[in-house]
Image (cartoon, helix red, strand yellow):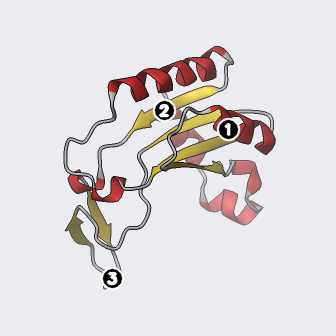
């Protein structure tokens, strides 16, 4: 079962461009990342620049509208993610609990939708998805 663990650092929604975590926090996180890798559960991981360096494309009017960050209405934003492959939701939670997160950080755990989870009609509509997905790995 694949799960995405999403790091949500409170206050990151207002971080200025170029904001980076302190070296000691990165060192602790690298030990955690290494444990995920050594356990054979880590698929990929990345940190994200603050929203002040991003953009959003919305479609409320039926046409794409680009808004540059920061986004005043945001209450929570992603700071990074891990994609892991584990046997259960409980195992994903156990890994998240081991993270050396600070007291202003939250990890949200979301199971990835597998192709087999969808009805036959949806699988037919998504014909070619598995090949497309495989082409992105690698």
Question: What percent of the width, then of the height, locates residue 90?
Answer: 80, 42
Q: For the residues carrying marks 3 and 1, which lies nearer the camera in this image?
A: 1
| Disc 2/disc 1 C-alpha distance (Å) | 17 Å
Taking depth in this image into account, of 35 and 45 the one nearest to the observer is 35
Q: Which mark is residue 62?
A: 3
Neighbour class for label 1 at 10 Å: few (<14), some, many (≥20)?
Answer: few
| Disc 2/disc 3 C-alpha distance (Å) | 33 Å
Residue located at (33% from left, 82% from top): 62
49 shown above or below 13? above
Residue that mark 2 sits on:
45
Q: Which mark is residue 97?
A: 1
Neighbour class for label 2 at 10 Å: few (<14), some, many (≥20)?
Answer: some
53 shown above or below 29? below
Residue located at (55% from left, 17% from top): 34
Question: What percent of the width, then of the height, locates residue 101?
Answer: 53, 38
Question: What percent of the width, then of the height, locates residue 63?
Answer: 28, 78
Q: Answer with left or right where residue 103 lies relative to residue 127.
A: left
Residue located at (39% from left, 24% from top): 24
């Amino acid at each position: 079962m694949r799960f995405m663990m999403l790091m949500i650092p409170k206050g990151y929604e207002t971080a200025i461009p170029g904001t980076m975590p302190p070296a000691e926090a990165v060192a602790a996180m690298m030990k955690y990342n290494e444990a995920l890798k050594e356990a054979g559960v880590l698929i990929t991981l990345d940190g994200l620049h603050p929203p002040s360096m991003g953009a959003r494309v919305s479609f409320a009017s039926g046409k794409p509208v680009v808004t540059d960050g920061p986004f005043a209405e945001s209450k929570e934003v992603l700071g990074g993610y891990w994609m892991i492959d584990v046997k259960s939701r409980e195992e994903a939670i156990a890994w998240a609990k081991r993270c050396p997160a600070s007291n202003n950080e939250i990890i949200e755990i979301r199971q990835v939708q597998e192709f087999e989870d969808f009805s036959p009609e949806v699988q037919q509509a998504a014909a070619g998805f598995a090949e497309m997905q495989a082409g992105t790995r690698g």
